[in-house]
Image (spheres, grey):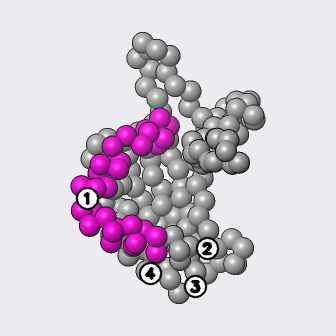
Amino acid sequence: MHEKMDGGMKRKRLSWPGLFALLLSVLGTGSGWAQTPAPAPAGAAAKEPAYKVEYYYKTQWGHADEWLALFKKNHLPLLKALKEEGRILDIAIDRPRYHQTEDGRWDYRVTITWKSYAASNDPGNEQALIRKLFPDQETFKGEEQRRFEILISHSDVPIVSVPLEP
């Protein structure tokens, strides 16, 4: 959650994962597409299932290669470090082979299979990892700012498997 000052009063603003969780609580768990794995009961040995998210990135025309180079330089090492820690199980990056209409266009889809829903939302030691991986924080922050400046849109799509058999 993020806090925002508004006329001297503190107001809480939800992050994307927080908004998603709120949406799920409003929709309920009756619809299969809206189900988020429930945390295991305290003391239970039940394993929380893996949690897959597709992250779509649409860049300004002519900047897709620049965005990918910055992603590989400044974000992929963090994702790989999280994979080494066991929080991430798999990372894949795809791009469309052919052009799409502008309204549905995306340049890159990054699919991350997280160990669990909880692992996807726990910031853990990410800031310490970032400082370790990128000692020149000024350059890192500037390049990350540029990576997001050239984006037109970015969306996160949690994926839920649908059983094929009844």
Q: Residue at x 35, y 50 (%)?
A: 127
Query: Up-down: is 116 above or below 46?
Result: below
Q: Earlier in the sequence, mark 1 or mark 2?
A: 1
3 vs 1, front mark:
1
Residue 86 in view (yes/no): yes
Viewed as shown, does residue 139 lie left or right of 27?
A: left
Q: Which mark is residue 133?
A: 1
Q: Position of residue 78 (x, y in %)?
A: 33, 56
Q: Residue at x 31, y 55 (%)?
A: 130
Type of the residue with mark 1:
Leu
Q: Residue at x 29, y 51 (%)?
A: 129
* Residue at the disc numbered 4: 65
Q: Earlier in the sequence, mark 3 or mark 1?
A: 3
* Separation of marks 3 and 2 at Cα, in angstroms: 9 Å
Viewed as shown, does residue 16 lie left or right of 115?
A: right
2 vs 4, front mark:
2
4 vs 1, front mark:
1
Q: Secondary structure at mark 1?
A: helix
Q: Which mark is residue 61?
A: 3
User: Which of 70/4 is in front?
Assistant: 4
Label 2 neighbourhood size at 10 Å, few (<14), some (14-19), many (20+)?
few
Does the magenta run of residues contain 86? no
Q: Earlier in the sequence, mark 3 or mark 2?
A: 3
* Separation of marks 4 and 1 at Cα, in angstroms: 23 Å
* Separation of marks 2 and 4 at Cα, in angstroms: 14 Å
